Image: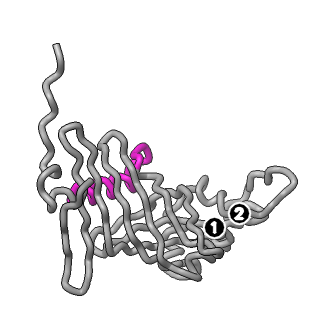
Amino acid sequence: MSAAPRPRPAHADDLGEALAEAFRLLARGVADRRSPFHTPALATIGADGAPEARTLVLRGFDPATRTVRLHTDVRAPKWAQLAADPRCALHLYDPGAQVQIRLRCVATRHDADAVAEAAWTASRSFSRLCYAVEPGPATPVPAPAAAPREEANGRAHFGALVLRFDALEWLWLAHGGHRRARFAWGADGLEATWLVP
């Protein structure tokens, strides 16, 4: 005997619910280490103009300001890339929810201010150790670098990235028909529209 079909979620046919679902998944990505949204891919523009993507950990989300927060080593190439061009994109996918979210963002970098200090203070000891590695990320070495032992040494290399998004694309995959929507915030407020998946 086959299982009864799952009820169709409200976000399948309502733009407001689709945006609310996207925001719920982002908030869960911060709070739940097991959420697939906990580790999004950040894409930046490299020095040569080519895109570069890498996985980071989602550390904060503020729906009121449409910002997400990520942490990085300020010696990593992405730090300089975002100084040269703060435009970036964040990609998140949850296979259980069958939802993909793409955020078009502008980054602000924080390393020696209250934002960075609060993020550092709230970080776990294990996370702080990552920033104490020597030499810095992406440096060629003849053998793998030794694991750092002193978390305090990492503070000088710690940075917080706050990404403000002005566009969010939401894609829900479903047997009964995919749904795709775009939400864009501009001078006239929010513009929401369905897109062909």
- At which x and y percent is residue 56? 52, 58
The residue where tag 1 is placed is 73
Quadrant where the N terminus is found in the figure: top left
Task: State whether residue 158 appears in this view.
Answer: no
Magenta stretch?
Answer: 19-36
Disc 2 from disc 1: Cα separation: 7 Å
Give the residue furthest to the front.
196
CB under 8 Å between callouts 2 and 1? yes
- At which x and y percent is residue 176? 18, 39
Q: Is residue 79 magenta?
A: no
> How many labels sit on residues?
2
- Residue 26: name its quadrant: bottom left
- Residue 139: name its quadrant: bottom right
Q: Which mark is residue 137?
A: 2
Of callouts 2 and 1, the N-terminal one: 1
Give the residue furthest to the right.
142
Q: Is residue 112 above or below residue 6?
A: below
In-front residue for pair 152/147:
147
Q: Amino acid at mark 1?
A: Asp
Q: Residue at x 24, y 86 (%)?
A: 187
Query: Few, some or many C-alpha atoms within 10 Å of disc 2 (few <14, some 14-19, many ≥20)?
Result: some
- At which x and y percent is residue 59? 45, 61
